[in-house]
């Protein structure tokens, strides 16, 4: 079983990959199913890792939008046939960088293992 620390690091890794994906820009994103799939996959990883964090971590850091993060994962995984590309990019450009900062701050509060 992965620890909360490992899951938070998974979120940070996926956030870095999201940043790399969106560097291609909107044109490449719209033109490439592979780029779209890569972004969706990384958002799903973020949501899955967030959803498997302990209740203690989520309660200790209520300003992190844990529920919305897991909801995005569920939406892309279960509503795959109706994913809004504009929303994906909005999340990638605006929400994921903020989440990365929040997760880094959470990690700073945790003892090193």
Image: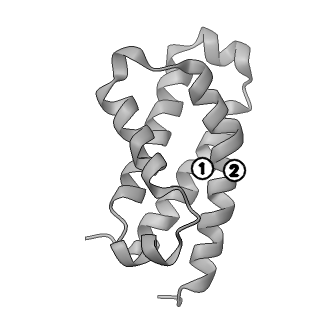
Residue 79 quadrant: top left
Q: Is residue 27 above or below residue 58?
A: above
Please give left or right for residue 5 compared with residue 28 in the image: left
Residue 28 location (% of width, % of height):
68, 16
Residue 3 falls in which quadrant of the image? bottom left
Query: Pointer 1: what residue?
Result: 15
Q: Is residue 47 above or below residue 113?
A: above
Coloring basis for residues: one colour
Q: Report helix, strand or loop for mark 2.
A: helix
Q: On the image, which quarter does residue 100 sit in?
A: bottom right
Left or right: where 17 falls relative to 73: right
Residue 104: numbered disc: none
Mark 2 Cα shell of 10 Å, populated few (<14), some (14-19), many (≥20): some
The earlier-in-sequence mark between 2 and 1 is 1
Q: Residue at x 64, y 28 (%)?
A: 89
Looking at this view, is 14 or 80 the one in front? 80
Q: Which class describes the residues within 10 Å of circle 1: few (<14), some (14-19), or many (20+)?
A: many
Q: Position of residue 49 (x, y in %)?
A: 39, 57
Quadrant containing the N terminus is bottom left
Query: In this orientation, does residue 3 appear?
Result: no
Callout 1 secondary element = helix
Q: Residue furthest top?
A: 31
With respect to residue 14, does 111 lie above or below? below
Q: CA separation, marks 2 and 1?
A: 7 Å
Q: Which residue is mark 2?
A: 97
Which residue does the image show at 47% across and 31% down from the upper left?
A: 40
List x then y, in percent, for residue 22: 68, 31
Query: In the figure, 110 relative to 107: above or below?
Result: below
Q: Position of residue 33 (x, y in %)?
A: 50, 15
Q: Residue at x 53, y 32 (%)?
A: 39
For the residues bearing labels 2 and 1, Cβ distance under 8 angstroms: yes
């Amino acid at each position: 079983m992965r620890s909360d620390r490992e899951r938070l690091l998974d979120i940070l890794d996926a956030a870095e990959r999201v940043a790399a994906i969106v560097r291609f820009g909107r044109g490449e994103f719209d033109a490439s199913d592979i780029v779209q799939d890569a972004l969706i996959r990384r958002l799903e990883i973020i949501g899955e890792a967030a959803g498997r964090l302990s209740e203690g971590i989520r309660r200790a850091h209520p300003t992190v939008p844990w529920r919305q993060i897991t909801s995005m994962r569920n939406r892309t995984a279960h509503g795959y046939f109706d994913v809004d590309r504009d929303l994906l990019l909005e999340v990638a450009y605006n929400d994921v960088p903020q989440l990365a900062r929040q997760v880094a701050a959470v990690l700073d509060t945790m003892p090193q293992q």
